[in-house]
Amino acid sequence: MSATDPVSHISDAELLSMTRDLDALHHDLTLPALKDSLSEWTEEIRERTAAGEPEETEQRMFFDRRKFLIGTGGLAGGALLAACSSSGKPASSPSSSPSAMAGGEGQKLSGDLQVVAMAASLENSGIATYMAGIKAATAGKLGTVPGAVVTFAETAMSQHQDHVQAWNSVLTSSGKQAVTAVDSVIQPTINTAFGKVKTVAELAALALMVENIAGETYQNGLSVIKSAAGIKTAASIQPVEFQHAAILSFVLGQYPVPNSFTGVSSARPPSDYHT
């Protein structure tokens, strides 16, 4: 890579070491914590269902979708988003088969389950973004791509897959359908931005944007979700998204932890999951 490429400052060995540490933390700490909270949550759901208690109907909403589109500090890759607002044809979806990712839509959900469905769709958007990036990299569409970059993308995508499986297990335990659709509000922006990606650095900036949105959505979820076990679930996933973001920031030559406290200006509101 050239000296002007912001990715060139990090060696393959450094990135591979970070990725190994990320994966070890996921399997040794965050994934076991996630499984424990899910077990507690699904048991809570079974008990509530057996008792004939209704689903929560009220949901506190603090943010709307416009804050995603006009937010500042929480949105990484601002240049990409600015490019997205220009005229022209929308880019194709980063998913190789976006029409196949349409399950779980249209079902009636409320309360915590609406939060769960939103989280699942957002994780699906993350998976689709990494999948498209890996395909573009291995097809030679992004120039010379270090193997360590692909390894990181595969690792992050695998962790997002673990997360969406967790959220969907809550839905299916509640007698609902699993959500395999991408986030319908942010996906067009991701698609347009991805269509403009020509380098590894631009792809990393796009992935960083998606990770920051996911992390802030879970941060917001801590104050929105009503189930104690559900709060634990969101809390076990949120640090992983920001671990991804920290590595991507480092890859881009940025300070890995730009803010002392995580914000919620980019959080995805459950109200945008249409039922």
Image (cartoon, rainbow, N blue to C red):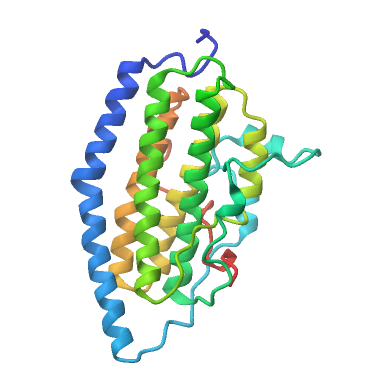
Nearest the camera: 30 or 260? 30
Q: How many marks?
A: 0
Expressed as whole percent of the image width and height from the top left, the position of residue 272 reads: 59, 64
Could you tell me residue 79's position as x and y percent?
Answer: 64, 32
Residue at left offset 45%, top offset 22%: 253
274 lies left or right of 60: right
Q: Position of residue 100 (x, y in %)?
A: 57, 53
Does residue 4 sit above or below 190 in this rendering?
Answer: above
Q: Nearer the viewer, residue 40 or 208?
A: 40
Q: Which quadrant holds the C terminus? A: bottom right
Asked whether residue 257 appears in the rendered view, the answer is no
Is 163 situated left or right of 74 in this image?
A: left
Residue found farthest to the top: 3
Q: Is residue 72 above or below residue 171?
A: above
Instruction: Decide which of 86, 190 is in the foreground and name it.
Output: 190
171, above or below 50, in the image: above
- Picture residue at 27% right of the left edge, 37% below the top: 23
- Name which residue lies at 58% across and 46% down: 97
In the rendered image, the residue lying farthest to the right is 87
Q: Is residue 192 left or right of residue 63?
A: right
Q: From where the camera sits, is residue 93 visible?
A: yes
In this view, the residue in front, 106 or 57, is: 106
In the displayed structure image, the side of residue 185 where residue 8 appears, left or right: left
Residue 72: quarter of image: top right
Could you tell me residue 274's position as x and y percent? 60, 68
Outermost residue toward the bottom? 52
Residue closest to the far left: 28
